[in-house]
Image (cartoon, helix red, strand yellow):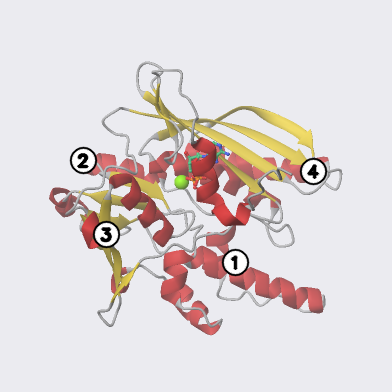
Amino acid sequence: MNQPTRTELAALGEFGLIDRLSKGVQLFHEQTLKGIGDDAAVLDLGGQLTVVTTDMLLEGVHFDLSYAPLPHLGYKAVAVNISDIAAMNAVPRQITVSIAASNRFSVEAIEAIYSGIKTACEEYKVDLVGGDTTSSRSGLVISVTAIGQAGKEKLTYRSGARPGDIICVSGDLGAAYVGLQILEREKQVYMANPDMQPQLEGKDYLIQRQLKPQARMDIVYELRELGVQPTAMMDISDGLASEILHICKSSSVGATVYEDKLPIDGVTYTTAVEIQLDPTTCALNGGEDYELLFTIGQNDYEKLKNHPDVFFIGYINEASKGINLITKNENRVPVRAQGWVHF
Ligand code: ADP
Ligand code: MG
């Protein structure tokens, strides 16, 4: 009689599922300062604080081997994790890499992935200290864990934004998403007719943003040099709208974002229009740009106002005022998350 309950994953979505799984997770150690719920966990192991984060890339979900070169894939798997360390305003130190591959892959192919992993290790100055290797029956899986460090006063959580703070992003948005649309389009053309050459001319920037994103550690170091301590920070993996909602929820605040202040690269803009996408929607909901979204107190504005990579897109307000986008026509519309729908 008693049918076991079955809830579809799609009914919860990714964030709903994480919320549900994390309920009742007990923390046994005082050393665990922050568990689930930020870009990385924060541990007090003595000395500086330690941050730990992990991200997994799956073939067919996060990448498509028909256009993702293997070295880029290895690089990206590391970069997206370093990006979460950067989002904590911490410095990355070590990574572990776990790989599951089927016999469809040769040793040389796995080595090609590792050449990208090693390039990223060099670039971000992290030590590859371990991992796991196993076989897979379907598709390639790469999972990376990154460990970083920061002083207690340096760490930035999602929860520190206060009304009056200025909302900043570290670079242009929407390019990675538009790049993906172009790669998908050319793949369809190729599958219909393998003699066709892909039309990627002039789209290098978009494609590079999709296939080889950079973690913005440079911004972390520059903020330190300028003496700017962000009040809250996270990286833009799921899309600006989704991340703003996360910061507002964690910080119990609202926000006002101006459409005309959203940084959109010229090629992103024209290509979006060309393929009948709204550039603003791409910037708000595209995701995978791996830029940093952060808030600063107004007294830090002077120090950052001439920074070539930092864009000021709005401000934090009281929660009661909501989370709104002021459009180019001066309409006020609530910010909604589309982000990536995994299920
Ligand atoms: P990000 O986009 O920064 O990688 P996620 O949205 O994946 O972050 O995760 C949000 C938070 O939930 C993080 O603290 C992450 O460690 C945690 N988390 C995600 N999946 C799980 C899981 N299956 N079990 C426990 N914690 C998880
Ligand atoms: Mg993140």
Q: Which mark is residue 255?
A: 3
- The residue sitting at 45% across, 23% down in the picture is 27
Q: Residues within 10 Å of mark 4 (few under 14, many from 20)?
A: few
**Beta carbon of the mark 3 residue lies under 8 A of ligand 2:** no
Dot 1 falls on a residue whose secondary structure is helix
Residue at the spot of label 4: 108
Q: Earlier in the sequence, mark 1 or mark 3?
A: 1
- Report the residue at 66% width, 29% height from top: 131
> What residue did someone put label 1 on?
180
Mark 4 or mark 1, earlier in chain: 4
Tag nearer the camera, 1 or 2: 1
Cα distance, mark 1 to mark 3? 29 Å
What secondary structure is marked by label 4? Answer: helix
Measured as percent of width and height from the top left, residue 322 is found at 27, 61
Q: Earlier in the sequence, mark 3 or mark 4?
A: 4
- Nearest the viewer among 113 and 63 is 63
**1 or 2: tag closer to the N-terminus:** 1
